[in-house]
Image: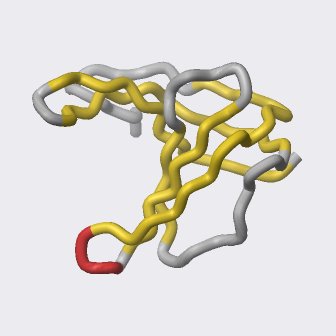
């Protein structure tokens, strides 16, 4: 059974419908093969992230439906919670 692991245990997959994108930043990562997209959603104070092979038009201000799960990343020795998007669609 294919779960979505974060740190060795399964996380629950969550769904948000028609949530407004407040900020959308795209930047190339490690060798330029991938573009990391970081979204900030209205009413949420954690970043939502996903990767694509190439840049996409900005989603800022658009309502989107997303499927995601929580994930912990280490940044400068601190644990930071981010939401990893596994599916995103404009609503």
In which quarter of the view is residue 41 placed?
top right
Q: Residue lying furthest left in this view?
A: 77
Q: Is residue 34 left or right of residue 9?
A: right
Q: Is residue 59 left or right of residue 47?
A: right
Q: Is residue 89 left or right of residue 84?
A: right
Q: Position of residue 14 (x, y in %)?
A: 61, 24
Q: Position of residue 50 (x, y in %)?
A: 50, 52
Q: Position of residue 90 (x, y in %)?
A: 82, 52
Viewer-closest of 40 and 7: 40
From the viewer's perspective, is residue 65 above or below residue 35?
above
In which quarter of the view is residue 4 placed?
top left
From the viewer's perspective, is residue 23 above or below residue 77?
below
In which quarter of the view is residue 8 placed?
top left
Viewer-closest of 15 and 62: 62
Q: Residue at x 80, y 37 (%)?
A: 20
From the viewer's perspective, is residue 87 above or below residue 37?
above
Q: Residue at x 65, y 71 (%)?
A: 56
Q: Quadrant of the N terminus?
A: top left
Q: Residue at x 59, y 44 (%)?
A: 39
């Amino acid at each position: 059974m294919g779960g979505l692991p974060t740190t060795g245990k399964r996380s629950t997959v969550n769904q948000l419908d028609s949530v407004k994108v407040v900020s959308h930043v795209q930047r190339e990562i490690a060798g330029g093969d991938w573009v990391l997209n970081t979204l900030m959603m209205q009413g949420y104070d954690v970043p939502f992230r996903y990767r694509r092979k190439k840049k996409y038009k900005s989603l800022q201000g658009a309502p989107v439906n997303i499927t995601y799960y929580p994930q912990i990343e280490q940044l400068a020795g601190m644990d930071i919670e981010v939401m990893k998007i596994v599916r995103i669609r404009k609503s």
